Image (cartoon, rainbow, N blue to C red):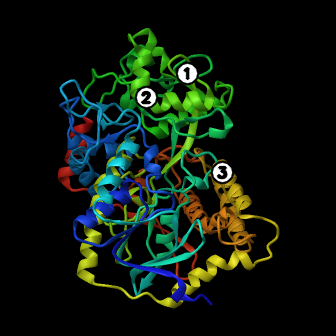
Amino acid sequence: MTDLDSIEQYAYDVLVIGAGGAGLRAAVEASACGARVGLVCKSLLGKAHTVMAEGGIAASLANVDERDGWRVHFADTMRGGQYLNSWRMAELHAKEAPERVRELEAWGALFDRTRDGRILQRNFGGHRYPRLAHVGDRTGLEMIRVLQDHGVHQGIDVHMECTVLELVKDGDRVAGAVAYERERGLFRVFSAGAIILATGGIGRAFKITSNSWEYTGDGHGLGYRAGAELIDMEFVQFHPTGMVWPPSVRGLLVTEGVRGEGGVLLNKEGRRFMFDDVPALYRDQTADSPEEGWRYTQGDREARRPPELLTRDHVARCIVREVREGRGSPHGGVFLDIAWINEHLSNSEEHIRRKLPSMYHQFMRLAEIDITKVPMEIGPTTHYAMGGIRVDPDSQMSGVPGLFAAGECAAGLHGANRLGGNSLSDLLVFGKRAGEYAARFANENGGTTIDGSEVRRSIDAALEPFSRDGDGTGAYQLQFELQEKMQNLAGIVRREEELEEALASIANLSERAQSVAVPGNREYNPGWHTALDLPNLLTAAEAVVRAGQARKESRGAHFRDDYPDKDPESGKFNLVVRRGSDGEMVLEERPIVPMPEALQQIIEEQQQ
């Protein structure tokens, strides 16, 4: 029996779990509202996965093209999400993103500039106009730097290298969290009037991913077990461009900014294959050839933009097609060539190094490739989960009172497919809202009481692997098997029999995870950490597969080889995952709330 008196205990008005862009922005806002704020992060402060976001922040500042505005951004987001998005979240996001970017600038963010000194914006996939405010290709790093400095000066308590195991409830309301220090293996208990989940995505459920080791679906699993609903879990975005060579960095992200700055996709024959499959929506049907027929016809028939900047799901499937049909690169990808601009731009090598410094150094150091001279080998990599905790669009509160979510572990904004750059503005817009409303909830509803027996159960369960004999199978092996199955059976292209096989494998892995044994002790034990990550990974994987089975159509990032077309009826609902009373996963269709006439009119206007 665990002695609670020996465990470190902390009390806050608002507890934020996750210190990426969403978590930091939420913590900053909650603190500004007068709340006592605790911030728990799985890794070191400043190490959050947001630092890997390179392309920029999508916001309709209209600094490069004055025709841009929130209405265009709203319509682009809804179209990219195949209209499964929460229209209210898309509306708030488009309206508030510019102010959040200006706010970040006021706090010290050093954006790239236009010649007249305004924030520079670049083209990105799915956006009609140049919309991404950026800092070279290190935008996420700059965002974290600014938010971290701003937050630290507000006196926010930070608990680094600390992983939350379970949420604790007081009746129906969330009341606190049980966590452990990764270094020493000691437990901590946090009580809070409100909790914000901002833990990121689920990429580590797949073999090839741009996501760092922290992305094990912690927020998804914590929220699900606490009674929150998950939504849109079938939609997993595979970024079209991850490193293919060398194998040690396979999947590492190659920013869409490379294509935004003029990079083109080539097969082994040196042909720009993206012209082979341009959707009719973006093609001039009267042209004599695909190259001549390419137009971004939405509102401006004369604006030419490369087909490499179509939505990520479409580009990823085109790359997979080239590889499967034998036109791929030597190491199983295709080529991304930014060096071709040498023929058209003076001082191009300097331009590439200045606009894409991280990409230049990444390939030079890891693959000994100079991207100013030769093409990169790239291929699709698991990148982003559109699915996550279902939240109220305005407040970001889940169905569990006092439990909020923001960023990638929350869902609704992106629908069936996220547009590049919308992730960073999502973090800012809804991180702020989550912090504001969480502080308000804590203030209006008073303190909570934590049940010691729940804390003891959580801690005892965490220590159980040390007392098992096991069958010789370690936690790493189970995670590896899960990643293999998800990559091969529930990846970019899906079909019924493979999803059924994946579900059976997940059930088997879940059963085996119950008997995983961990040798050694609690200090510096990554094998134990992996064993504790498994329940969240398995929950997220099961939700992806079950939702993927239920959606018998192809839409956005979800592509069914056996159902290759969209089903109009399936576009009328979201798939919601919740935990049943018997502990089993339950799936149900939830009708989409009709869009107000004023917003519908914006959509129709932007399609003309």
Picture quadrant of residue 293: top left
Work out whether residue 42 or residue 502 is closer to the camera in this orientation and state it: 42
Look at the image and tell me whether residue 377 can be seen. Answer: no
Q: Mark 2 sits on what residue?
A: 356
Q: Residue at x 20, y 46 (%)?
A: 601
Q: Do the residues labelled 2 and 3 touch (CB within 8 Å)?
A: no
Report the residue marked by disc 1: 370
Check residue 434 in the rendering and tell me which mark sits there, or answer none: none
Which residue is depicted at the point 74% across and 74% down?
515
Q: What amino acid type is highlighted by mark number 1?
A: Asp
Q: What element carries label 3?
A: helix
SS under mark 2: loop
Task: Find residue 489 and name its label.
Answer: 3
Dot 1 crowding, Cα within 10 Å, few <14, some 14–19, many 20+: some
Screen quadrant of the C terminus: top left
Q: Relative to the observer, which residue lies in front, 428 or 363?
A: 363
State the residue at coordinates (32%, 31%). 122
Q: Residue 457 in the image: state x and y as whole percent.
A: 58, 85
Q: Is residue 136 left or right of residue 216?
A: left
Q: Distance between the residues labelled 2 and 3?
A: 35 Å
| Separation (CA) of disc 1 from disc 2 | 12 Å
| As drawn, 365 above or below 531 | above
- In the rendered view, does 104 fall on the left or right side of 244? left
